[in-house]
């Protein structure tokens, strides 16, 4: 059967719902499925194509759901399967796709498989679903190898054997509560086939895949070649723990499984991977036509506010990913990263004082630029409200396991996960149905001016900018053209065109520059004076003739015309 081509995902704009912080439907201070359901019409009005739901499965929540104890159920904290089904139905009625998060690299230490492994003998079938190994040293008191965990500390924890004596060690690339599964054991792959089918049969449109460069480890688990890596440094560079060639077999298998659903009803189910690899060319390997549909391109998110840095990273993605026929999946924010408003509030160079207004202007500009790039994009909840990071949360409220593992509050991710403000002037700002409910992380008073209600009332807010950009992105034919052409512009700007007659320019400097196109822009992230592009801003122009060429070869970035 010929599958009709319906590649909605190639230029989709998806919205990440970090469930515990999106909206609370039962008044316990933690976001849930009922709350998320009630927020769907808001997302439809914003104009996104769908949602990625962070994990909602039974979990002791040591890593906020990325420690899954049962892959085929809903944690009572978030609701139940009936509520989940209602959410999927409502989303589909509103024209929104739903992706769920699947976590295949590790499970929770509370997962029945791990509990069984703890009760079982070394070498047993139950232990062989994980990486159990004898320790080194005279009495096995040293970890089996020198690998470090992503969140700090050794990647191994020693267990007590059923007879009470200290025994083997198990591998966990994240916290000790998240034992890594051994994907060389076929039972693991078969289990996840069933997990995918379970959710696909409930109508989901695809999956966000956690740690998609994990799963397989180098056979024999030898020492990492970098034993002197700083204790505190994340071991994402360990070439033996990540990005093993065998993982591609999993993505081919999952793609075939998704395609088997499309073969029945013609609707493509999508796999988007968290693929943090050294280069875009490495990432392109995950996006071969029979592997993942999308992979988050994190290089742009990590770029400092600098025209060269942005241009180089965009160009590298287009050269090494888009040129293979795969879409680039742009992202500026997620639940693991400091929010862009705060990130961009600092400038390159020593002695710079953070300035949140400047950060907000830059975050808006970056978003407008991102939405003009060819490919798909993911927004993180609150980004459209222009929310800054909540800094200065007291130590005792922090919940991120990174803080526990490193003892460093600065490294925690709680500040981007504070429950969203929806309305009103006092906490919980409409997040919880129950007035006065204590939200799981405290909301600061200043959230009042960022609430959905106040942002929608303010015609000049980032909410309106995102909505207009999304509407235009849908309606403008040039933005469907996969090609991007760079143009020379004034120093500290980037300028590109799409298709026939669309131009986007970004001014990274702290002063206005001459506009690189005639007439008024159709949309700008900051109001522009006639003939100018404001400081730290981006704008879109529709051209009815060739754009004016500016600059004299001083423009940053590669491959300029
Ligand atoms: C991914 C998730 C992150 C989680 C980690 C471990 O990076 O985005 O939140 O802590 O995986 O599952």
Image (cartoon, rainbow, N blue to C red):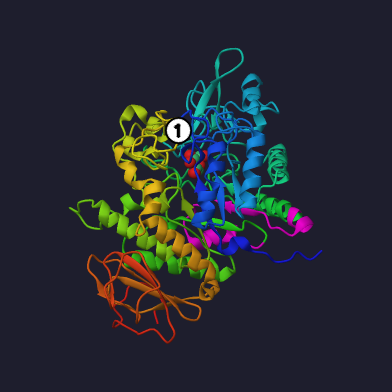
The residue identified by callout 1 is: 154
Q: Relative to 398, does residue 389 appear above or below in the rendering? A: below
Query: Around disc 1, counting alpha carbons within 10 Å, would you say few (fewer than 14), some (14 to 19), or many (20 or more)?
Result: many
132 vs 530, left or right, is right
Q: Relative to 142, does residue 313 appear above or below in the rendering? A: below
Q: Is residue 197 visible?
A: yes
Q: Secondary structure at mark 1?
A: loop
Q: Residue furthest left?
A: 351
Q: Residue sitting at 60 percent across and 60 percent down?
A: 9
Query: Is 399 one of the magenta-colored residues?
Result: no
Q: Residue furthest bottom?
A: 545
Q: Relative to 256, does residue 336 appear above or below in the rendering? A: above
Q: Residue furthest top?
A: 163
Q: To which quarter of the image does residue 228 belong?
A: top left
Residue nearest the viewer, comparing 50 with 110: 50
What residue range appears in magenta? Answer: 261-289
Quadrant in the picture for the C terminus: bottom left
């Amino acid at each position: 059967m010929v599958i009709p081509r319906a590649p909605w995902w190639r230029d989709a704009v998806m919205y990440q719902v970090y469930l515990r912080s999106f909206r609370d439907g039962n008044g316990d201070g933690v976001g849930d499925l009922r709350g998320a359901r009630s927020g769907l019409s808001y997302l439809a009005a914003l104009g996104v194509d769908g949602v990625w739901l962070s994990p909602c499965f039974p979990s002791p929540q040591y890593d906020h759901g990325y420690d899954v104890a049962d892959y085929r159920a809903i944690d009572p904290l978030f609701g139940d399967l009936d509520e989940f089904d209602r959410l999927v139905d409502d989303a589909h009625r509103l024209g929104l796709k739903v992706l769920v998060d699947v976590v295949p690299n590790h499970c929770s230490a509370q997962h029945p498989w791990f509990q069984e492994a703890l009760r079982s003998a070394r070498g047993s079938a139950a232990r062989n679903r994980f990486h159990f190994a004898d320790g080194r040293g005279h009495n096995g008191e040293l970890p089996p190898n020198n690998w470090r965990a992503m969140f700090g500390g050794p990647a191994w924890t020693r267990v007590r054997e059923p007879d009470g004596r200290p025994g083997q060690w198990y591998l966990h690339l994240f916290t000790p509560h998240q034992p890594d599964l051994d994907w060389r054991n076929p039972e693991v792959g078969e289990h996840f086939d069933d997990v995918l089918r379970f959710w696909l049969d409930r109508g989901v449109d695809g999956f966000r895949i956690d740690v998609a460069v994990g799963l397989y480890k180098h056979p024999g688990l030898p020492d990492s070649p970098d034993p002197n890596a700083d204790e505190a440094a994340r071991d994402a560079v360990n070439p033996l723990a990540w990005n093993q060639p065998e993982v591609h077999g999993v993505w081919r298998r999952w793609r075939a499984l998704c395609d088997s659903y499309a073969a029945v009803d013609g609707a493509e189910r999508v796999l988007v991977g968290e693929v943090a690899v050294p280069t875009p060319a490495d990432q392109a390997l995950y996006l071969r036509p029979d592997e993942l549909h999308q992979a988050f391109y994190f290089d742009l998110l990590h770029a400092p506010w600098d025209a060269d840095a942005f241009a180089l990273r965009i160009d590298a993605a287009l050269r090494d990913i888009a040129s293979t026929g795969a879409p680039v999946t742009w992202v500026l924010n997620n639940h693991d990263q400091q929010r862009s408003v705060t990130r961009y509030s600092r400038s390159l160079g020593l002695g710079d004082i953070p300035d949140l207004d400047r950060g907000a202007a830059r975050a808006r500009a970056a978003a407008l630029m991102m939405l003009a790039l060819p490919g798909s994009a993911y927004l993180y909840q609150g980004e459209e409200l222009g929310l800054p990071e909540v800094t200065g949360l007291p130590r005792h409220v922090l919940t991120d396991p990174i803080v526990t593992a490193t003892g460093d509050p600065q490294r925690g991710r709680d500040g981007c996960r504070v429950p969203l403000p929806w309305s009103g002037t006092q906490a919980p700002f409409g997040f919880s149905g129950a007035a006065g409910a204590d939200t799981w992380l405290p909301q600061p008073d200043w959230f009042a001016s960022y609430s959905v209600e106040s942002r929608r009332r303010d015609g000049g807010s980032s909410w309106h900018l995102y909505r207009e950009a999304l509407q235009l992105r849908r309606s403008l034919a040039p933005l469907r053209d996969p090609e991007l052409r760079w143009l020379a512009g004034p120093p500290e700007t980037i300028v590109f065109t799409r298709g026939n007659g669309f131009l986007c320019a970004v001014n990274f400097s702290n002063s206005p520059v001459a506009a690189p196109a005639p007439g008024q822009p159709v949309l700008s992230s900051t109001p522009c004076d006639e003939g100018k592009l404001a400081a730290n801003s981006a704008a879109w122009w529709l051209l009815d003739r060739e754009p004016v060429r500016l600059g004299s070869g001083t423009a940053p970035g590669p491959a300029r015309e």
